[in-house]
Amino acid sequence: MSNESLANLLKEERRFAPPAALAASANVTAEAYEQAKADRLGFWAAQARRLSWEQEPTETLDWSRPPFARWFADGRLNVAYNCVDRHVENGLGDRVAIHFEGEPGDTRTITYAELQREVCKAANALTELGVEAGDRVAVYLPMIPEAVITMLACARIGAPHSVVFGGFSADALATRIQDADARVVITADGGYRRGKPSALKPAVDEALTRPGTENVRSVVVVRRTGQEPAAWTEGRDVWWHELTGRQPEQHTPRAFDAEHPLFILYTSGTTGKPKGILHTTGGYLTQVSYTHHAVFDLKPESDVFWCTADVGWVTGHSYIVYGPLSNGATEVLYEGTPDTPHRGRWWEIVHKYGVTVLYTAPTAIRAAMKWGDDIPAKHDLSSLRLLGSVGEPINPEAWIWYREHIGGGTTPVVDTWWQTETGSIMISPLPGVTTTKPGSAQRPLPGIAATVVDDEAREVPDGSGGYLVLTEPWPSMLRTIWGDDQRYIDTYWSRFEHRYFAGDGAKKDDDGDIWLLGRVDDVMLVSGHNISTTEVESALVAHPKVAEAAVVGATDPQTTQAICAFVILRGDAAEQGDETALAEELRAHVARQLGPIAKPKRILPVAELPKTRSGKIMRRLLRDVAENRTLGDVTTLTDSSVMDLIQAQLPQAP
Ligand code: WT7
């Protein structure tokens, strides 16, 4: 990023100090940065003591064979014991662990004592099926309590789980079963999605016809929707309620080494086959537990935490299952979509359960903005005291809207940067310490070392941009790519020597705070200037007529790339209007905000944007459109008809 364009880009000047009351009783204060700086490994060794170990580790980090890290290697613990049993032993058995809200409105309240019984039964059930420590279990479930119970049961017996998002196809499921060589699949008849039951079991049946899945000997089926399974393979398929129903409610947890695998989670990325990201137990649980305590300031006796992610993503693993439960939190688990049966459903849930801390994604916030301020305004959201964001850069306008319309203008907003690979939050404000800046994740957490470097791996000065790198190993880091150590080295540790390359562009402002700019593949080169898609998108959505924007660089003979912006207009602007005049108005607006170099060459109003199931815009497909190419792979889109719609709407490109 050239400094000349940066000077134009760093314009966000709004600042929000932590509320005094929160700061006064915050779980973590500014001291933590000092302690961790003075003794990073000592700091993490102290955080490991948040957990109950059967054998306390004496060694913190073994980095003798980089980039293969071993954390707390001589410690032994059981992850499920830490998330469930120890709270019951501490007299908290009656505390609610999970307030489950099904999409059709059915509910279930699960205390820690009940969770313990359910996890024990499920652990005994897996053992009856012959699952042993080290065997992989594939999980293909909707957002129902059995998903959490299954993950904890796997952890309890040392069988790594591989959760596959319930919205994925039979193909995606088959690839993941093959790669992990799973022995058992846990699924359901179906789940509720947009007011209708949506079947899951048929996709499992189909996946298991593919070569490479022969080692799956059991399929356990939770009855959720009551849909009659079309096929039932005797000897392989078994109902969850029958299998767990006959199990004892006691199970003695066994301790495993801190480096025993906990789970594999596949990330798709843009090219190549999905990468099986491997996480282990001791270091992972230490950092998810600490970050959940520090970033969300969680007070387990009074807070009600709600992370809206799906357990099929890492956010669900770390901040629905392992972080909150290791901290003894009370949390909400919601099965469905935010707009079923109406667009106020989430806000209704916040009020109903008295949610105090909400953690969601910018895509959901922008959808709520588009639906209108009047919707959240109809609900009492005064229980909320802290808001979090994750998944992609949050535009300052969305950040401000979130704070104003969901947080009542008073709650801190923490923008948390991390990845499937990092396992837990890495860069984020601390709610009782940091004066926040809308759009910036700001500082590495205590004990985390991150910076921004240029092409030659030199750290850039404040006020400049480049690539985000992590400069020291961290406890919840991925240990490898399942079955492919070389790909682990090549993908993350080869671009810059001794540094983890995150694949994200970033800049440091004059205070040294970090602003994430999106994947490096999403940085455009226009007449010799690097311009981030995120910044142009932020400028566009700051215009009152624009609800959402996606920007790509299309090959251009004069300027290398030309900026092409796809915009969704807000209600009124979409109906009336002269498109040419509007495009001109938006181009002028971006030029004013960012400088003439960032002015989009083309502005294309569309009704929808192509998004992956985890809410990320697939710019690759928009680039195909902008460059008049045949579309690439659309199978990971939420709704592949969006692309037909976009193409039908467009004037033929020049
Ligand atoms: C990528 C990782 C971490 C859980 C969800 C996504 C982007 C994530 C932020 C943020 C800017 C962000 C990055 C990152 N990202 N959080 N706060 N600000 N960008 O996990 O699917 O592994 O994606 O998401 O590009 O590399 P993931």
Image: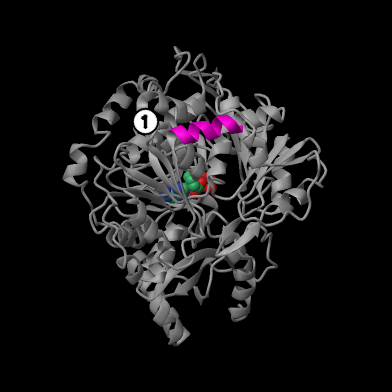
Q: Which residue is drawn at 27% across and 44% down?
A: 511
Q: Is residue 189 above or below residue 624?
A: above
Q: In this view of the protein, can residue 459 be seen by the observer?
A: no
- Kindly identify which residue carries mark 1: 92
115 falls in the magenta region:
yes
Report whether 652 appears left or right of 374. Answer: right
For the C terminus, give its image quadrant: bottom right
Report whether 394 appears left or right of 122. Answer: left
Tally the marks. 1
Report whether 333 appears left or right of 442. Answer: right
Please state the horizontal and vertical placement of residue 568, each as a whole percent of the image. 47, 73
Q: In this view, does 464 lie above or below 246?
A: below
Report whether 33 appears left or right of 97. Answer: left
Please state the horizontal and vertical placement of residue 439, each as a whole percent of the image. 35, 54
The residue closer to the viewer here, 281 or 400, is 281
For the record, the magenta segment spans 113-122
Please state the horizontal and vertical placement of residue 406, each as a whole percent of the image. 31, 59
Magenta stretch: helix, strand or loop mostly: helix
The residue closer to the viewer here, 177 or 582, is 177
The residue closer to the viewer here, 96 or 290, is 96
Corner quadrant of residue 370 = bottom left
Please, what secondary structure does the residue beneath circle 1 have?
helix
Corner quadrant of residue 255 = top right
559 falls in the magenta region:
no
Q: In this view of the protein, can residue 397 be seen by the observer?
A: yes
**Colour scheme of the rendered structure:** one colour
> Three-letter amino acid code at disc 1?
Leu
Please state the horizontal and vertical placement of residue 340, each as a whole percent of the image. 49, 65
